[in-house]
Image (cartoon, rainbow, N blue to C red):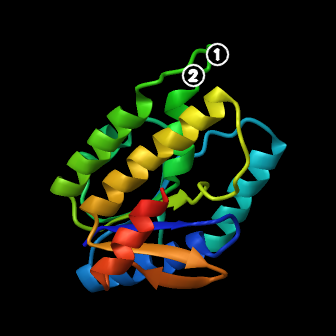
Amino acid sequence: MNVFISGGAKNGKSSYAQDLAVQMAKEKKCPLYYVATMIPHDDEDRARIERHRRDRNGMGFRTIECGRDIDRELADREGVFLIDSVTALLSNEMFRADGTVDSEASIRIAERLKSLCKTHDGLIFVSDFIYSDGVEYDELTDAYIQGLAIIDRALAKECGKVVEMIHGFPIDYKEERANYDDWTALI
């Protein structure tokens, strides 16, 4: 089964995803991978990456550093893959190093991740729920939020389990179809 996990900042998404990935890998008796999508740009990013490394120390993860085109990186591998995070993946592919913006990145990523879901069992996607603060943003930020929504909806549809982390508690939206419809209406 593939799993999509969303939630606000510091709501326990990564810890929940790590525990779930370890459990899945033990049950399947297969390799366990952490697909790190963040490309660090400053000391704050590097500190966050280091904290995540410490958090998963001793859990058995093999780390794959891959900020773009993860479908190619995972194509010929088998195992359980914790992909943290979809949010960073979109940022990496949408906002290019040369300063240009790829306005089609979200559609391309959504299609690639949907294809990956069809060929792999044991994918865990972590994304940030950034849709409800009510602030008006500039056009570029709005495009990013809309792009993330495209990807999140695609993953929510493809994955067998959809979880929102709220204050450290997982809410499974696919347990009841009505909850799933409610969640996808929010993004």
Q: Which residue is mark 1?
A: 99
| Relative depth, front residue between 183 and 156 | 183
Image disc number at residue 161: none
Residue displayed at 73% across by 63% down: 51
Residue displayed at 43% across by 68% down: 183
Residue displayed at 62% across by 39% down: 39
Along the horizontal axis of the image, is 132 left or right of 93? right
Q: Crowdedness of circle 2 by 10 Å Cα count: few (<14), some, many (20+)?
A: few
User: What type is the residue that disc 1 sits on?
Assistant: Gly
Residue 34 point in image, percent of width and height: 47, 60
Q: Dividing the picture into quarters, in which one does residue 169 lie?
A: bottom right
Disc 1, SS: loop
Residue 187 point in image, percent of width and height: 48, 56
Q: Dividing the picture into quarters, in which one does residue 100 lie?
A: top right
Residue 80 point in image, percent of width and height: 33, 67
Is residue 148 placed above or below 91 in the rendered structure?
A: below
Along the horizontal axis of the image, is 53 left or right of 155? right
Do the residues bearing badges 1 and 2 touch, measured as CB atoms within 8 Å?
yes
Q: In the current view of this chain or complex, which residue is farthest to the right? A: 43
